[in-house]
């Protein structure tokens, strides 16, 4: 049984979100369509978090070392000391995270992940959700996340992942968009379709260890990586 790590809810509703054109562009097999639909569209009836947001909440809670739910955690004195950078709205976690006094929301195009306007060693936690597939240079974007983290700080993120294949760039392929069916905005263009090697992007960006958190594998995966203290 799935328990919502945002609110402890245990009742879920299914709202499939994929549309045929995207499924064709992404070349999803029926079982892949099914688990991506669950990742995005199976939602906690109590708080609305989908499985992707719940996986991300699990990653955040593991990174800060608590057994509380996210809603309980943000009310603690420890949480109120954290400096948190949320890059684009992290699904239904956004209203929870923004309750924290040390929270900053950075939204494209005002803030570009390739060139974050923050000093090195600024944040305890950097969070983004289903954003990395939309940036042209994901390794540089992840390296920027690492740069702005304090030593021992953690990056937690989700990306739509098809675990039965390897990552491919969509460079040279027809444009494919996420977001609402009718949208064609450039910030929804997919640059990278991530596969089972998605964790290697974090190592290429300079992190030395990666943790994969899952909810109802393979529906929802969230990655986390801690910035090492450094021995230099
Ligand atoms: Zn919930």
Image (cartoon, rainbow, N blue to C red):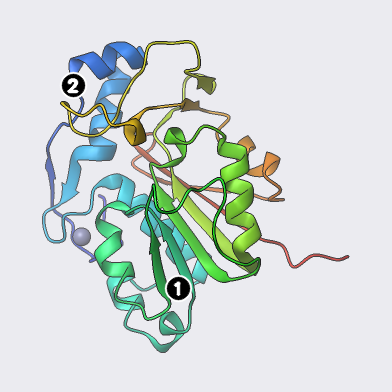
Vertical comparison of 134 with 157: above or below: above
| Residue at the outermost front position | 110
- State whether residue 30 appears in this view: no
Q: For the residue labelled by badge 1, is the local secondary structure a helix, a strand or a loop? A: loop
Q: Quadrant of residue 141?
A: top right
* Quadrant in which ligand 1 is drawn: bottom left
Question: What residue is shown at x 29% (from left), y 38% (from top)?
Answer: 39
Residue that badge 1 annotates: 66
Mark closer to the chain start, 1 or 2: 2
Tell me residue 125's x, y (percent).
Answer: 51, 66
Q: Residues within 10 Å of mark 2 (few under 14, many from 20)?
A: few
Tell me residue 12's x, y (percent).
Answer: 14, 48
Q: Residues within 10 Å of mark 1 (few under 14, many from 20)?
A: few
Residue that badge 2 annotates: 19
Disc 1 versus disc 2: nearer the observer: 2
Q: Quadrant of residue 28?
A: top left
* Mark 1 sits near ligand 1, with its Cβ under 8 Å away: no
Q: Is residue 149 left or right of residue 6?
A: right
Vertical comparison of 39 with 169: above or below: below
- State whether residue 195 appears in this view: yes
Question: What residue is shown at x 65% (from left), y 58% (from top)?
Answer: 147
C-alpha gap between disc 1 and disc 2: 37 Å
Tell me residue 218's x, y (percent).
Answer: 39, 34
The quadrant the C terminus occupies is bottom right
Question: What residue is shown at x 41% (from left), y 60% (from top)?
Answer: 86
Q: In the depicted view, which residue is nearer to us: 137 or 67?
A: 137
Q: Quadrant of residue 226?
A: bottom right
Q: For the residue labelled by badge 2, is the local secondary structure a helix, a strand or a loop? A: loop
Q: In the depicted view, which residue is nearer to us: 38 or 174?
A: 174
Label 1 with label 2: CB-CB less than 8 Å: no
């Amino acid at each position: 049984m799935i328990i919502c790590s945002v609110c402890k809810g245990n009742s879920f509703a299914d709202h499939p979100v994929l549309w045929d054109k995207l499924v064709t562009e992404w070349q999803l097999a029926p079982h892949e369509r099914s688990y991506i639909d669950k990742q995005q569209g199976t939602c906690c009836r109590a708080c609305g978090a989908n499985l992707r947001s719940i996986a991300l909440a699990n990653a955040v809670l593991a990174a800060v070392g608590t057994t509380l739910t996210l809603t309980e955690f943000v009310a603690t004195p420890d949480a109120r000391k954290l400096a948190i950078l949320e890059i684009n709205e992290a699904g239904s976690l956004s209203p929870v995270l923004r309750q924290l006094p040390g929270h900053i929301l950075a939204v494209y195009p005002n803030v570009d992940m390739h060139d974050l306007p923050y000093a090195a060693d600024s944040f305890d936690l950097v969070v983004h959700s289903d954003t990395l597939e939309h940036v042209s240079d994901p390794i540089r974007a992840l390296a920027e996340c690492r740069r702005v983290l304090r030593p021992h700080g953690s990056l937690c993120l989700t990306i739509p992942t098809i675990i039965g294949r390897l990552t491919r760039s969509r460079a040279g392929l027809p444009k494919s968009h996420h977001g609402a069916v009718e949208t064609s905005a450039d910030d929804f263009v997919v640059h990278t379709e991530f596969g089972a090697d998605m964790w290697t992007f974090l190592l290429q960006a300079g992190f030395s260890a990666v943790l994969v958190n899952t909810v109802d594998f393979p529906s929802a995966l969230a990655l986390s990586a801690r910035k090492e203290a450094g021995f230099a």
